[in-house]
Image (spheres, rainbow, N blue to C red):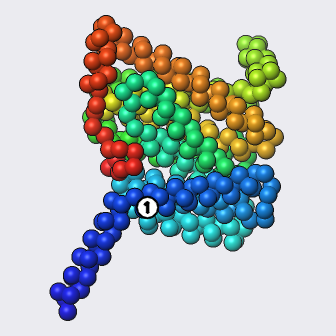
Amino acid sequence: MSSAVSLRLAQVSTSVDRLAVSRWPLVGWAVAVAAGLAVLVLGVLEIGPGWLPGAGSVAVAGAFTWALAARTGGRPVVFGTLAVAIGVAVLVLDDDRLRTGAAAWTCVVAAVLAVMGTVPARRLRHAAREALLATLVASVGALAVVGFEPVSSVVSFEYATLGLALLGVFGLVFRLGAGFHGLGRRGLLIVLVGGALLLLTLAYAELLRRYGPGAMVTDLLDVVRWSRENLGAFPRPIATVLGVPAIVWGCHMRARRRQGWWVSAFGVAATASVASSMMNPSVALLEVGLSIAYGLVIGVLIGAALIRLDLRLTGPRGRRARRAEEKAAGRPEPARGQALL
């Protein structure tokens, strides 16, 4: 009897392993995300019953949780199913606090997944592609966030989700980068500069919100007003100055050094900002989209400048030598659909 049970367990384990390496889970995940996104778009257009956006948010939250668990070496089936079950319970109970918590969870998962789903980039155009893909993932998460209809102040929600996303992504990068020992002097300097820039940005925004603008800030606000009136939107500073450049430069560096993961981690400043971008009901969807697009373009340009500066300081001299360096850049890292850990 015991041998028959063991044989049966071995057969089940083999079937699960075959399913894990097949394409069917990926196809099912893509269908779930596409269906959830379609339902969320219908909800934004106010087409269909009132429960439709919530159902789309549950589908996207479950799919993103599944993908993040798979990407980080966890148990995707367990966590994905649990996320869907919790989402359904939130919709059934219809409590404001539960809806807000589910929205925050979805925002954090989307922000972290957008960064962890990137791959190394040998050239600038590949790094720009990774920034675009991360922004698209976070944008889908933004629709799922508002689908839960959270009840919270915009500032509190943004601070909470950014803090949780930073903790999550740095915890994962700590393992990917071989802990603090994998930083080195150069990596430590990058982390310190990035952390200082993040803290200064948040602190300045908080001081501005509490005490009002000074003379120089008034001039800056005039630029913001001009941009919104003539260009339709103004890019979010934390995503433009820190988040997107970190993704671009980090993916480029990851093709050469593992310290690049520590740079990529700051990309969550952009993805968390994008994932929470639709929380303010007073801002039109067109303005939100334009703000994200402007921030992406400017951030890629800043990232390109950082890459050029990095190559000038540490890379080989001459066009031929740089081309040879690009071809040789191939630090091994799992593919986008494979587990990193």
The answer to whether residue 335 is left or right of residue 5 is right
Is residue 149 depicted above or below 287 in this figure? below
Q: Residue at x 76, y 51 (%)?
A: 44
Q: Residue at x 56, y 60 (%)?
A: 32
Splitting the image into 4 quarters, where does residue 185 fall? top left
Point out the image quarter for the N terminus.
bottom left
Which residue is more in the foreground, 25 or 280? 25
Is residue 177 depicted above or below 294 in this figure? below
The answer to whether residue 88 is left or right of residue 228 is left
Question: Can see residue 188?
Answer: no
Q: Residue 144, image x and y in percent?
A: 64, 53
- Indicate the amino acid at tag 1: Pro
Is residue 318 depicted above or below 210 in this figure? above
Furthest residue in direction left, as rendered: 3
SS at mark 1 in the image: helix
Q: Residue at x 56, y 24 (%)?
A: 299
Q: Residue 300, image x and y in percent?
A: 53, 24
Q: Residue 104, image x and y in percent?
A: 61, 52
Splitting the image into 4 quarters, where does residue 90 fall? bottom right
Q: Which residue is mark 1?
A: 25
Question: Can see residue 189?
Answer: yes
Furthest residue in direction bottom, as rendered: 1
Tag count? 1
Which residue is more in the foreground, 129 or 241? 129
Q: Residue at x 23, y 76 (%)?
A: 10
Q: Residue 325, image x and y in percent?
A: 28, 19
The answer to whether residue 151 is left or right of residue 271 is right
Question: Crowding at label 1, few (<14), some or many (≥20) Cα neighbours within 10 Å?
Answer: few
